[in-house]
Amino acid sequence: MPSASQPQPDATRELDPDLLALVRSRNLGALAAIKRDGRPQLAMVNYAFDDGTHTLRVSVVDGRAKVANLLRDPRASLMVTSPDGWSYAVLEGEVRFSPPAAAEDDDTVEELVELYRTIRGEDHPDWDDYRRAMVADHRRILRLRVARVYGLIQ
């Protein structure tokens, strides 16, 4: 029988471990922010999820629509699906950002290197080039602290 979890009204409640297992098993999801006109703005993102802090991290480019929308209104959701799409988990919470990458050896770039390794499970073929690109792109780390999770496991 499928298990389902409803949005949890209070962040002190336990997050559904079956839904979090789905989140851990993937690294690609649809991130939803709120546009100025109230409609959702969606973007596919690669992410890393930290079980200990229930925090999701994503590398983003400063100045893009999702960043501007989330700076204005930090409420966000991320939907993750099983490969067949029938099981899904939606993580909800508020977003915070690191400062934009400003130097090839700053804290943001160091975390971006660690995030790349976590998501990809391997080293980049040219870390110097990667570091330069992170600074040129004004990359930031988006952190979504999960307050609620809901979904369906089939």
Image (tube, rainbow, N blue to C red):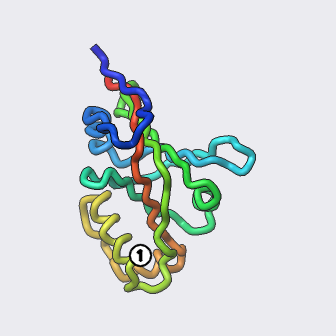
Q: In which quarter of the image is the N terminus?
A: top left
Residue 151: % across, % down: 40, 29
Q: In this view, which residue lies farthest toward the right?
A: 37
Q: What element carries label 1?
A: helix
Residue shown at 41% from the left, 75% from the top: 108
Left or right: 130 in relation to 61: left
Looking at the rendered structure, the kind of residue marked 1 is Thr
Judge from the rendering whether residue 92 lies leftward or rightward of residue 65; answer left or right: left
Q: Within the image, what quadrant is residue 148 found in?
A: top left
The residue wearing badge 1 is 108
Above or below, 37 against 122 in this view is: above
Q: Quick one: which residue is furthest to the top in this view?
A: 1
Q: Which residue is drawn at 31% across and 21% down?
A: 3
Name the residue: 48% across, 78% down.
101
Q: Position of residue 73 (x, y in %)?
A: 61, 54
Q: Is residue 131 above or below residue 72?
A: below
